[in-house]
Image (cartoon, rainbow, N blue to C red):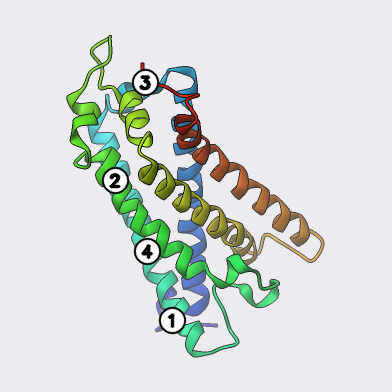
Amino acid sequence: MTGPGIRFWESSVGRKVLISVTGLMMVLFVVLHMLGNSTIYFNWLNAYSEHLHALPALIWAYRVFMLAVLSVHVFFGLQLALENNEAKPLAYVCKRNLQATFASKNMIWTGTIIAIYLVYHLLHFTAQVINPEFSASHNADALGRPDVYAMVVLNFQNLFISLSYIFAMTALALHLTHGLQSLFQTLGLNNEKTMPLIIKTGAITAIILSLIYISIPVFVLTGVLKGQ
């Protein structure tokens, strides 16, 4: 319970809810981003990118919104993690009724890995300041569109870039495995009967999403996806 003078985000419950809601928004982003990335298998990536950036104001508004969502998630997640470390045996959000796993015990580290890689990834494929010779903004496809397909393939032919991406997506899978469980528990969407199903479904969802992401650099390295 919180007193009338305590703001929502100042209570432990309020912060957990904020972490869960922002986490859900980011899960939806991960799914949508995965669907967009998957167009590479149908040779639609350049067309998808062109249509996506046809409304720059909308794209930038969405980016600012997601930055705010990420900032809230990271800030309160770190805050609760530090508080829990000082008050052991408490642990990361809503872990009290969940069996401790490698994923649950390392949420702070998988989250940190994801955050660090996200900065690198944005500089690489969004700002396109890393390996600019392959950037889509400086190279056009046969139809005169920014060649996002070639940018992705040429960069993932670099073993270090591919392995770092695979490592980050593995961290994402671990983070989602526990995060999805915690989300349902924090928002009161579970009970003793449904929790085992939620745990299994969350783990399967996390693995499938990460494998789809990982498949792109793997298929580039194995020659399944080649430059056009």
Question: Helix or strand or loop: what does disc 3 sit on?
Answer: loop
Upstream in the sequence, badge 1 or badge 2? 1
Q: Residue furthest top?
A: 143
At 42% across and 22% down in the image, what residue appears? 226
**Residue on which the image places disc 4:** 72
Q: Position of residue 26 (x, y in %)?
A: 46, 51
Measured Cα–Cα span from mark 2 to mark 4: 19 Å
Tell me if mark 3 has few (under 14), some (14-19) or many (20+) residues whose alpha carbon lies within 10 angstroms of its own.
Answer: few
The residue type indicated by label 2 comes to Leu
The residue type indicated by label 4 comes to Val
Disc on res. 218: none
Disc on res. 122: 2
Camera-near label (1 vs 3) is: 3
**Residue on which the image places disc 3:** 227
Asked whether the beta carbons under mark 1 and mark 2 sit within 8 Å of each other, the answer is: no
Camera-near label (4 vs 3) is: 3
Upstream in the sequence, badge 2 or badge 3? 2
Measured Cα–Cα span from mark 1 to mark 2: 28 Å
Tell me if mark 1 has few (under 14), some (14-19) or many (20+) residues whose alpha carbon lies within 10 angstroms of its own.
Answer: some
**Residue on which the image places disc 1:** 82
Upstream in the sequence, badge 4 or badge 3? 4
Query: Looking at the image, which is closer to me, 63 or 202?
Result: 202
Q: Is residue 73 visible?
A: no
Query: Looking at the image, which is closer to me, 117 or 202?
Result: 117
